[in-house]
Amino acid sequence: MRKIDKSTILSKVYKAWEEALENNHQNHPKYNSSAFEFYKDIVMNLYHCQNGLCAYTEKAILLNGFEQDKWSEEGRYINSIPFHFGELEHFDESLKENKAWLWDNLLMVESKINRKKSTKTVDTILKPDSPEYDPYKLLAYNHEEHIFYPNPTLDENQIKRIKEMIDILGVNYVKDWRKQYILERTKAIEFGLEPEPVKEYVTAYEMTLRNLNL
Amino acid sequence: MKVTELYIQEYNQFKDFRLDLTYPEGHPKAGQALEKVCFIGQSGTGKTSLIEILKETLLVIANQSFISYSILEDVTIPATTSFENSRIDITNHETHISFDNKLQVKFYGYEEENEAIDGEKSFFMTFIGLDYNMVNFLIDEFKVLFYPSNIELLKAEKLSKDKNKTSINKNLLDFSKYDLQSSWSTINEAIIKDRELEIKKSLELSKLLQNPNISQKEVFKARDEFLAWRELSPNPIIDLANNFLNKILNRFNLKVKTELDFEKTEDIETIKIQTKQGKDIPFEGLSTGTKQVILTALPLYGLKPEKSIILFDEPERSLYPDIQAEIVNFYTSMAKDSQFFFATHSPLVASSFEPWEIVELKFNDEGYVYQELYYDKKKGRHVDNYTINPQYLTWTGILQKVFDLDQEGNDLRNKQLVRIATLESQLKHNHLSLEEKKVKFEEYKKLATLLNWELK
């Protein structure tokens, strides 16, 4: 689960609207999914920040990238959303009631992961867009079974919290696909070939290379 | 006669739906009809519908009253059929079915003024490419066997006891209508004839022995004659037992009883099952799965269908995984030069098929069904372009790649995998005391066993 930088704001109209609500301590309009005025803007802005990958699993969920991508000068997304497997996810589900459109709480994740996580209570120790989040400090990677686990050098309490969050966010849900994807590349290196560029599962791949001293 | 293509113009979830049922380029049988086909897909995608559409169209084709030498020209003829018990009404939609002997039959819907009378429905059909040989074949030899998913075994037993034998359509054996157990005795004349003959010969022998004036020489002669007869005319039940049924029955610690001990008239007409140790088991006492295997296999064995089409909905029903993995080969070994269609939810059943023999059904965005292709369409339908082969995969692999299951196990497995990875890492890298290490290692070993975690 890589660190996500959400500071690039393409959806300027939405962001100004959201900031105004926050500054005035107002409740957000009720969550109504894609019927919402800025829905497309939020989704496409998030995809930009996440490179079209699921925020938790790093699986590609916007398959054909950003070819159709178009923003107006004032900052509105003016095309339809390309085919994708994602859903707009509220990291902290409890904020959905009154802060449904809070930029800080929104991510794009694969729909299966969203359903699996559902309304489970979260711990911000693993929040991919939080400024403190660093996967290389919090997580370790078993490159034989292709699973993330808590960095064993942390204290027992942190290990316990991270273990819980790995499960809630479904970080290992894609392990069998991730395994195939990474092995195809590490095998190429082992055989002295150029591996295909890595677009998905970037963190797992990087950690595998480090584990294997490649 | 095998189906090479099925086309459905529009029917429920099918729209402009075309199935290529031939071996792909690069295959030794390229272009020929598939010998076996497996329909898979989520419930509701129409696996059973496809089996039933095949059944209904083939039923009409196999129904000799439609076939006559007068339709050798490619003409469209009006026809009627009764579909009282059928879920599928072929008179309602356009369907084309093509065969490997170049025969194509097209069905068209009926017109308003040609409405149904007395449960019979009228429709139009066109035979294209029919010749005299085909007509003869269709009338005399062509057979379609249909096994529904809900074979009513209990009903079958009751019917059999009532001796209520259903008459059997010569060309179509629809086991949703016929009683499997009683129909088997009608089908398997060879075994019954042999049994009757054996009883007759035994009686002759016994009469001879009862004659007080018979010499020892004559006794030996009669006995040798009896043994010579048995040797010259092999007992078909031994063939059935050794070459077919016992292969599967032995898995249940059972076998076919080959000796004839004649107690009741029914003994001639049914086969008896024993434990491998030789203890008779009444048919009612057999498990559902065992009954299913025996009753579905008997018509295949009895009819020895050739150039026929055999339709099976959910062959895995009530069967344990090891038998599921073998059942397709078991059934297909019993019919020569025939085409089998199976609809299944079982990854073990699917593992018996070559990739091109699998028809995976999925819904598209508009709610219509399409066939998921296992090859890159741009590269073409060639064996080298297939990326999935169920015969090469592990069971987990089949579940994940063919049946689209995301996870290799229960959600809890992933949670425990994180736990064991943490333990392993702590054992490797942390400076634990010897005592702590011992405790953690015990925990690690126990969990590794539970997870089937390979120690590397």
Image (cartoon, coloured by chain):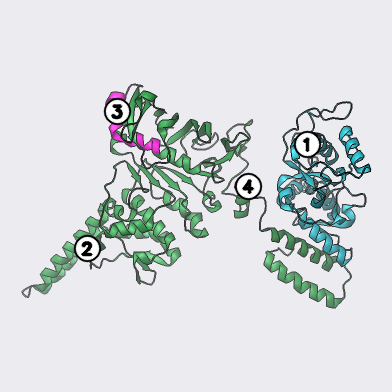
Chain colours: A cyan, B green
Of labels 4 and 1, the one closer to you? 1
**Horizontal arrangement in the rendering, residue B107 relative to residue B38 (left or right):** left
| Residue type, numbered disc 4 | Asp
Q: Which type of secondary structure does the marked residue at label 2 adopt?
A: loop
- Checking the image for residue B265, the label placed there is 2
> How many dots with numbers?
4
Marks 4 and 1, how far apart in space? Answer: 32 Å
**Residue B214 to residue B367: above or below:** below
**What residue sits right under mark 1 in the picture?**
A36
- Quarter of the picture containing the N terminus of chain B is top left
Marks 1 and 3, how far apart in space? Answer: 68 Å
- Quarter of the picture containing the C terminus of chain B is bottom right
Do marks 1 and 3 share a chain? no
Q: Which residues are magenta?
A: B56-73
**Horizontal arrangement in the rendering, residue A6 relative to residue B273 (left or right):** right
Disc 4 and disc 1 in contact, CB within 8 angstroms: no
| Residue type, numbered disc 1 | Phe
What is the x, y in percent for residue B270? Answer: 29, 60
Circle 2 Cα neighbour tier, 10 Å, few/some/many (<14 / 14–19 / ≥20): few
Q: Is residue B70 magenta?
A: yes
Of labels 1 and 3, the one closer to you? 1
Q: Which type of secondary structure does the marked residue at label 3 adopt?
A: helix
**What residue sits right under mark 3 in the picture?**
B132
Badge 4: chain ID: B
**What residue sits right under mark 4 in the picture?**
B404
